[in-house]
Amino acid sequence: MLLKPFGKKPMYIALGLMLVTAILSAFMSNTATTAMMMTVVIPITAQFPPEDRFKTALALSVPIAANVGGISTPIGTPPNAIVIAALNQQGISIPFGEWMLLVMPIVIILLLVSWFTLGYLFPPTLSEFKLKLEGKFNTSAKAITLYVIFALTVILWITEAQHGIPSSMVAFLPITALTVTSVLTKEDIRNLPWDVLWLVAGGIALGVAMDNTGLATWIVSSISWETLPKLMLLLVFGLVAYMMSNFLSNTVTATLIIPLAISIGTSGIAGEGFNLIITCIFVGIACNIAMMLPISTPPNAIAMSTGFLKTSDMVKVGIIVGIIGLVVGLLIATFVWPFMI
């Protein structure tokens, strides 16, 4: 239903998939969003000729949009949550709406870059395509309740700066309301991805331990950070976070790099002019745009399981989007964010 406004041209259908996925990933787990959206992609790809490479573009459009869309909000991905938690421990609070304002230009640019890249590498052979998806708008009482609670939660998150309720407290609203209204049952709660939640919590705990034991300070003191220009310092952090996240969990990478950045900022090693907020957010973005391999992010792994993708295809798109993302993020962090933070 949400894809109908995008017409019959394959490239616009792919754009529709990416926009819907990105928006949902901003307020939901990007892993859950990818799993849900791939159920839409599979019947679409089945209608294309077997030799049409555009199937690859469609299968890649969802995980890429989920990874990029997750950057949009503090709750979109685990690295974002780690950045927020680490800054909160330093007495720095970033309202939900301010985060969105800071990163939204990067998200929009990367979505467009990804869309053009997919169309260039995997052009469709069909000029038009008739979208055949059966579905209807759910108007049951539970569905309406869910819509209202979802909308109210998003509004409260975005307007955090106006009412002063922290986004972490607002998050209790859907948990409580959906449980009380029986929209969310005990079976649904049991089926939640608790392993992902524990991974985030474990990552935050590891970061705190590195800071409290002095390990983070020892690591950063072994490098002559003061000899690096501010732009180069930011670039080094971004490159290290990006490369590590491609081969490790982006959650683990954020857990390791963010405490290092905070140690540099709080110890004064980096010298005057080092902006802790800008550096941490940029590192979080660098972790999120690492999507070269199936193991880089859960959305990539889910997309790979469809059988429409080759690792080499994912690497091609991942490198292009990652490098452009680093450049765009670095430029915005250097020339725009200082006037906003």
Image (spheres, helix red, strand yellow):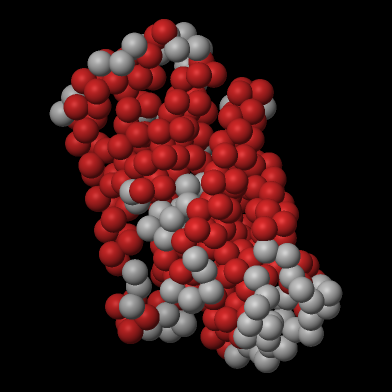
Q: Residue furthest front?
A: 51
Name above or below for residue 37 compared with residue 140.
Answer: above
Name above or below for residue 287 compared with residue 177.
Answer: above
Q: Which image quarter is the N terminus in?
A: bottom right
Q: Is residue 35 left or right of residue 12?
A: left
Q: Is residue 186 left or right of residue 75?
A: left
Q: Residue at x 51, y 41 (%)?
A: 285
Q: Which image quarter is the C terminus in?
A: top right
Residue 238: image x %, image y %?
47, 32
Residue 187: image x %, image y %?
33, 84
Q: Residue at x 46, y 82 (%)?
A: 183
Is residue 20 visible to the viewer in this orientation of the structure?
no
Is residue 138 visible to the viewer in this orientation of the structure?
yes
Name above or below for residue 219 compared with residue 96.
Answer: above
Residue 273: image x %, image y %?
51, 12
Q: Quadrant of residue 90?
A: top left
Q: Residue at x 19, y 27 (%)?
A: 215
Residue 67: image x %, image y %?
52, 55
Along the line of sight, the residue nearer the viewer: 259 or 190: 259
